[in-house]
Image: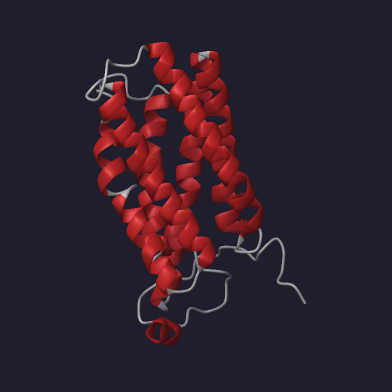
Amino acid sequence: MSVNDDRPAAPVAALQSGIADPAPLGLGAFALTTFLLSAFNAGWMTSASGLAWLGYAFAYGGLGQLLAGMWEFRNRNVFGATAFSTYGGFWIGLGLYFVLVGNGLLAHPATAGEFSKDVGWILLAFAIFNTYMLLWSTQVNAAVFAVFLTLELTEIILFIGNFTGSSGTVKFGGYVGVLTAVCAWYASAAGVANGMGGRFRVPVGRPLMGPRV
């Protein structure tokens, strides 16, 4: 996540790094997959299977983000590399859990209660990770901070909803998850537009905390 401020994009910098900024890809992949699962949690997919997110958890939210994370390593961007690689792994892992454990391909299928508790533990673990990434996102820009703030709220609300078995809380978490996706799409769109160095500029806001002096 290397679109750090609202200064004019620098095509020369992209040439010097050897690759284009992978952050818009990672953010877009995260946004789309989060939207699909959150729309299901929010109860919007009443006439659908609710599994539209699953394939994209592997192909886009998973593999797409993981690749973006690897390219961020090439860019020496430790924050972007850690964030995209971790959440790429999150989506792949969640998809594998659903297929292998939730559907019982490895063992007896998990009961509804067991499945809910398992998902709750997964979300708790990622909420812990997201907490310190939220703190460090204050040094990136306001758009990225908004992504991690709404994601933190989403994970906490869904963790509570899954642990307590409260469908209303899970539904509320779905709405916050949709907001998270919108924030990530905005940051992705800004990265594409600003990275092109063309006529359109999309503001991302200054970092909430400046660099050390």
Indicate the position of residue 42 as horizontal and vertical percent values. Answer: 44, 25
Q: Residue at left 57%, top 28%?
A: 157
Indicate the position of residue 86 as horizontal and vertical percent values. Answer: 45, 50
Q: Residue at left 26%, top 29%?
A: 99
Indicate the position of residue 112 as horizontal and vertical percent values. Answer: 38, 12
Q: Give the vertical position of 16 relative to 125 (above or below).
A: below
In the visual, does 110 lie left or right of 169?
left
Whether residue 197 is visible to the viewer of this picture, yes or no, is: yes
Q: Give the vertical position of 50 relative to 205 (above or below).
A: above
Q: Give the vertical position of 35 relative to 201 (above or below).
A: above
Q: Residue furthest right?
A: 213
Q: Residue furthest left?
A: 105
- The quarter of the picture where the C terminus appears is bottom right
Indicate the position of residue 182 as horizontal and vertical percent values. Answer: 46, 45
Q: Quadrant of residue 33?
A: top left
Q: Residue furthest front?
A: 107
Whether residue 185 is visible to the viewer of this picture, yes or no, is: no
Count of labels in the image:
0
Q: Quadrant of residue 73?
A: bottom left
Q: Residue at left 26%, top 28%?
A: 100
Colour mode?
A: secondary structure
In the visual, does 27 lie left or right of 60?
right
Q: Residue at left 54%, top 27%?
A: 159
